[in-house]
Amino acid sequence: MARHFRPPFNLCPSPGVLLPGARGERHTTAGMASMEENFPRGGIQKKPTGTTGKKAKPKFEQDNLFDVHHEEQTQKRKRSEGDHRKQKKFKADIKAPAKDIAISIEPLTIKELCEGMLFLGCIKEVTVFELVISLPNGLTGFVPVTHISDAYSELLSKQVTQGELLEDLNSLSDLYSPGMLVRCVVTSVEKSADGRRSIKLSINPKSVNKGLSASALTSGMLLSGFVSSVEDHGYLIDIGVSGTHAFLPHQKAQNYIKAVKRGSDLKIGQSLNCVIEEVKNEGRVVRLSADRSEVAASIATEQQNWTLSNLLPGLVVKAQVQKVAPLGVSLTFLSSFTGIVDFMHVDPEKSTNYSPNQMVKACILSTHPTSKVVRLTLRQAFLHPGGSPNQLSNDRIGAVVEESTVKAFYKQFGAVFQLDDGMLAFARPKHLSKTRKSFKPAAFKAGCKHKCRIIDYSLMDEMCIVSLKHQIIEARFLRYEDIHTGDVMQGKVLSLKPIGMQVKVTDGIKGLVPSMHLADVILKQPEKKYNVGDEVRCRVLECNPAEKKLFLTLKKTLVQSKLPVLSSYEDAEPGLITHGFVVCAREFGCIVKFYNDVKGLVPKNELSSEPISCPDKVFHDGQVVKVMVLKCEPQQERLLLSFRLSSRTVPEGRSECIPKKKQQVKYQIGEMVDVEVLKKNENGLEVSILEDGGNVIAWLPTVHLSDFVANSKLLWHCLQEGDVLPRVMCLSDKGDRIILCRKSAVISAVQEEQVVRSFSEIQPGVLLIGYVRKVMPFGVFVEFPFGVTGLAPKVSMSDKFVTDTKDHFVVGQTVIAKVMSIDEEKQRVLLSLKVSECSSGDSAAESFSLLNQYFKEVEEIRNLLRRREESGLARCVCELVPGKELQLVVQDVMEDGSALFSGGCVRGLTVTATRYHLGGKNVIPGEKAKGLVLHVDAITSKVYVSLREELLKKRAKQRLTKNSQHPAIVQHIAEEFAIVSLLDSGRLAAIPIASHFNDTFRFDSEKLKVGQRIYATLKMVKANDLGVLLAVQDPAKKNAFVRDRKESETALEETLAAAVKHSLSLGDIVTGTVKSVKPTHVTVAIDDKLTGSIHASRILDEVPIHSFPTYTLKAGQKVTARVIGGRDVNTHRYLPITHPHFTRSVPELSIRPSEIEGEVETMRDDTREKLGPYNTGQTVTCFVRKYNTLKNWLEVEVTPDVRGRVPRLLLSLNTKVLKHPEKNFKNGQALSATVTGTDATETNLFLSLTGIQSLEPGTITVGMVAKMIPHIGLTITLPGGKAGKVSIFHLSDKYTESPLSDFKIGKVVRCYILSNENGKIQLSLRQSRLNPRNSRKVEDVEITCIKDVKKGQLVRGYVKSVTPSGVFFGLSASLLGRILFQNVSPYFVQKHSLYEKYLPEGKLLTAKVLDVNKKENHVELSLLPEDTEMPSVLPESLGLPRCGAEEEKREEDNKEKKEEVKMKRKQRRVNSESEQETKPKKRKFSPADENDSGIEVYYREEEDGDQEEEAAKKKSKIRKCGEVPRLQVSAGFTWDEDMNALEVPVLNQKEESSESEEEEENLQSKKKQTKKEKELEKQKKEKELCKLEAALMDPSRQPQSADDFDRLVLSSPNSSILWLQYMAFHLQATEIEKARAVAERALKTICFREEQEKLNVWVALLNLENMYGTEETLMKVFERAVQYNEPLKVFQHLCDIYASSEKYKQAEELYHTMLRRFRQEKSVWLKYASFLLKQGQTEATHRLLERALKALPTKEHVDVISRFAQLEFRFGDPEHAKALFESTLNSYPKRTDIWSIYMDIMIKQGSQKEIRDIFERVIHLNLAPKKMKFFFKRYLDYEKKYGTTETVMAVKTAALEYVEAKSSLADT
């Protein structure tokens, strides 16, 4: 250690010596006067005494140094030893005036902290078990509850041992509050696993006042103490000074007690600042005062005899400024001490105004135990003891400050900022930029502005801690206070424990997921699902910022729930539906828990519509349920719930509650949106929905990109980020993301309502379009839109025999399924995917529509590629189409006979021709050839070509006709189609491979082969953009393999009611019975099998409007009807009588008298013919089918085969009707409508219930809000699909601050048409336009043109913009006014940004018209308060100067400045003269003027710094010559390394430093040593060796090396503790092998009789192998241990080791082995039970008890059951434990030991009623009198403690009755 010390005058800062320039100062032993004499500094050389000037300068300096050293020693000897205080002063004075040494005062960092360092801290937070303390320079420490004071710790331990709450013991929050200043001492600085350091502190006065002794106490001292006991006349205070009793009288504490307001008395453990009033008996008795005024006025003085060893933080001292430096100030205080003040603790108001020798008041902040550095503060808040620093409002932390100004920047320590509210803030270097590399110092010059976020507040620095990091500014959660119940967040798994999972949310926020909340179901082995480090998505269940507790849930249903969050009883309004989770299911019902620990009861009758006898069997703990609130009493915290959601009517007043929640789900199933690709993943695309401004993110799976698997792959391959996909449908909006679909078949099914929305809508025989969800070996699961799922079993999957389901279907494939059967109880649907059952029968039409759709999609993909600007491959692929001829060059011929080609037009593509397509030509590489493109595969970039002559030769063009048949040759087979060449014309055509969506599998014999001859029927005679004709394979000439149908299948089909074969024909009269009445049709049973249908239009000849014709018929009524047509079973299309399937249709009937008697109209097959008779303007009667909420139209039926649609805006002119159209139009209701046209597909009529709307100016109509444009107005959709605009000036007759707040998209409004020119419609929503008669007074009159504006008029309008030329102000949609800046505000404003801040766009203001220029259309306005009589737009609080007073003020300021400058100059002259008189050699120092810019001061300081640096460089050069020998080791240095490391108590630091100096001297002059000197050196070394030996002999000394341990184990070879410490010593140095070797030595050395000692070593060795070894090495040690010790003990120890290291699987396996080997040992069963219960495996424990009772002898049973029950009480289910005790006591009622145990446990855990019941049962037992007396006594004791006088008397009476009964029995 000694070698590291340098002389105290060395300019290089070193760890051992602290100079004024290096982290404060500890004074050494020489006076300043001698220092100035002997050490000329700053370049001024004095003639040294006792030396000559002959030697060179470096040598001269060197000699001088040694002279000082000797002189210092002589001074020491001369000094009188008794005057201790004088010596201290003298020692401290050595460097006080040494001002020329460079000062580098640095803020404190955590690295400089050490154990024993004293601090003044401020309490930041108070928790249950610790105090969080704010320390200087932004540091934070923690005081555990055990480090408060000895008296408080005694109370704590007393409470723990008694197990009861003590009245005297107050919680930390009762004793302490944030903002209190406390003295504390560092006990340790620990480093956590993630590299963070944690500072542990103590405020125990024993530790804080350790340096004080009884003799050192004097009156006036300010000490901190703790109340240790409360006496009659005052309090005993623990001040931590041994042998001293401190007393605080009552009257001296009253003032403090009143101020603190914590009760009428001080409490034990309460912290106090006290002033010593009187010291008696040499410090053994001290009287204190806690009077606030006395404490606040206390100042530490020299008379109080403070020393460096006992100087305390918190003392206020008078100090003198010694030196001012950029990083702070150095001070001298108490005449002999020097301290430092860093830049964070300089008084901010005087930061640049300190000058040397200035007297200031300062407070000690910290003292270092070894370097003795004293840090002080000059901040005002700390200069009055007992006060507290300024605090920051809690809502300010976390705030983002848009503009913070850099005040100062310190390269290594960070930057100081001034925030927008004037507060100072500090940012550490790591918070100034994202990384070190990205840091730019230029951006932190004084005055620069930055955006930052307040992340903390340092109470001790009175500064905010800020961060400029972007991720922290943008962070959603910074503190626990930012987290709200119900928030969804991402986290990272930190650890898995029995209680749950710990999740890291951000750096400072951790949460717990209780084991119940790890999944929707309870996980037995969560480690299989979650790994440490996994990202999880969770939701906040409860957050308690005060205790820093955060509870989360991972239950998917709760996380994804869109229902409202129920987090307080006040929110629980009746009718609210939300998600909760079951926490208890009993016979009375279920208890359901929500967020923030809100609980409610679902009574038994509300669990289900069906009665449930045992709720605990139906519901399980943790189950997520959807509940409805029935009743809530917030004050009593009672909540009544129901699981019956659908059957209950919502109470009045809550009618809109549930729909409002539904509106939050933005996108409904079936809604069409345009999307932009954000990101491509392997299985899909992440997209943003453009309709919502790109803010909504959705997911488009790859399989949903197309109905065709090949196109899905191709589109995914071709899409890039940024591409837009139009018309994509929302498929589901469950949970956190929206799933989209682009399958055209699925989209059209949803749009045409060919879907089922719920299970109840499914009917057998219906065909539905869906997609494969899962392929299983037993069948295929098919999902349909709206979430309904069904199963197609293996037998119903295909007409062909299914070997492997995966050969037939793939996940995501589009299919058409037929519903075969439904199971309503289990909600299961069985489907068929057989083509024979799912197709319409027209295979040619179906296969062609598939092919056509496929090629349309391919063309869309090509167009997408063409639009890309980049050239190359994509463009090349687009230009190549089948049938194109290419000039190629043969590149290579492959082994299989195929050839590869290259060419200029196919660069980058692979061009190949198969052997067949080479046409028998022998091609050679390099040969040129002509090829015809057959197919281009964009994914693999392959082009398939043919060189066959018949394809290449030119033929005369033939005219082809549609549906003509042609022989063709298959040329190429792709995934979805085949390319064929027509034999007669040579043209290429594409034919589909599949004839149906479900036609996916073909046997090898059925597959098309290249070269095969087929017949093709042309469906498209013009080649499409892809160069091919479209055709289908002729069905007549296909060799399709169809399996013979079984009779059972045919029978099944025939039994379907709808498909009964009949012989009815058009016009037949039939009679039948009404079977059921539906809104738009009536079902009639014609005979037992045949069913017909009567449409609503076919019941009456004259239908009254608003009537319901179908309800004129009743079920069971006989009717006579006439057949007018038939309807197809599968498609529900109407069939003409000539249709081949008419005989298998549902007959359509009519009972209209005119049709029964007259002629029947033939129902038309062609849609155009159906709609032909209906003309625009014609009035028709229609019947409401339903209101389509997705499309916002009313669907109606005119006749059985004609349907219509009425758009929402044409339903009524009444906005109330349009608000809820589904309520105003009932299904089956007859309406009169006007035909307005037909839809694009001409399958439906467009109708209107309000006639044909005219949009002429002046008319009033209805519209719907389509778009809201801030500060502009609304876009309204009008009837007929047109759009109109509403300006913000036409929204109302009275302008408001936020005019658009009353509107939302979709709102229906009445509009007045102002104009309709060039297709642009202008509207008004003003009531004065809509209801001119009823409208009230118009507050803001319409301004249509400049003529409406008059000079001097007051007008209201909205701010349009702020420009350099003024503020532009909107008066109407067409007129703008201007406000010049001098007319905006009466204040003088320099920054125009202030106008933008206080005059944002859209702000409503009142202005006065100053001037109107009609020619130039200009209006000048004013906002000045004198014009408008309104407050100024810029508030007075800004403190801006008024415009008129500005110039006068400037003149006054100038005069004041001149006078101040004159005064300062005079003062400076006087100061400098006086300084020169006292210290002529000192440099002048001029502080900056108050109004000075500060530049001059900094310049002067830099000059000073430069000169000091030069001086330092000169000195270092001089030193360098002599530094080399310092590295040499003296020849006499022969001790080994371990000797050096030993702590030698005899050597103190002072002597060590002097030794180091002597050693250096010896190194320099060893050549000149005389005999006498050598003898002296020898004697000195002998003395040192003696000291060393004495240290080694010291019994209290701890071993510090292997040799020390060897010596100890030799003296005590049988002590296992020593051996274990020896092992631990090696493990600390991670020397595992050495630790093993020590263990083996111990096992050989310890005597064989010392079994326990040996076992201890074996256990340690097992622990070592478990931590550092492998499973194999552990097992080897275990096997040896079992041989040498009692096996059971070794087994048990290993089980404990496994459990503590969380190796639960290994522990369980070992327990199983123990149960087999030691099955008769009771302790093994109990230990295993305890292990299982700690794991939460209660069921396994119950099973274990049964096994234990079978294995153990009967006499042990009662004891085992009792012990199991006790374990259940501690770790498991208390209810089950009670049941065990009850059953045991029923069997063994006289076992008093069991009764006693049961009572003890119940007294701790049970209710008073349960405990009294047990006592009552016991005292009525028939036991021996001695035992009864014991129980009566216990009962009486219990009642005395917890009961009342009545209950005590009752027990005594019962005891008396028992005694009397016994005595009477004895008498008889």
Image (tube, grey):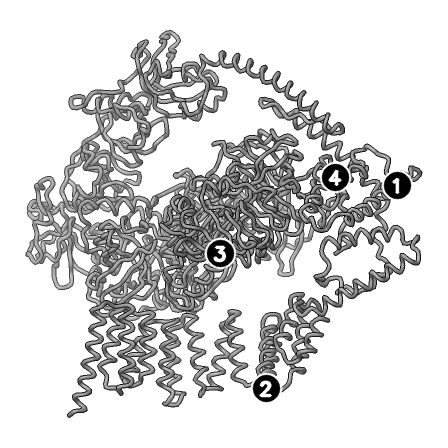
Q: Position of residue 571 (x, y in %)?
A: 28, 48
Disc 4 to disc 3, how far (Cα)?
43 Å
Point out the frontmost of discs 3 and 2.
3
1673 lies left or right of 1752: right
Would you say residue 1184 is visible in this rendering? Answer: yes
Point out the frontmost of discs 4 and 3.
4
1685 lies left or right of 610: right
Q: Amino acid at mark 3?
A: Ile
Point out the frontmost of discs 2 and 1.
1
Pointers 3 and 1 in contact (C-beta within 8 Å): no
Q: Amino acid at mark 4?
A: Met
Q: Which mark is residue 148?
A: 3
Classify 10 Å Cα crowding around label 3: few (below 14), some (14-19), many (20 and above). many
Disc 3 to disc 2, how far (Cα)?
50 Å
Q: Which mark is residue 1683?
A: 2
Disc 4 to disc 1, how far (Cα)?
19 Å
Which callout, 4 or 3, points at the residue further toward the start of the chain? Answer: 4
Disc 3 to disc 1, how far (Cα)?
59 Å
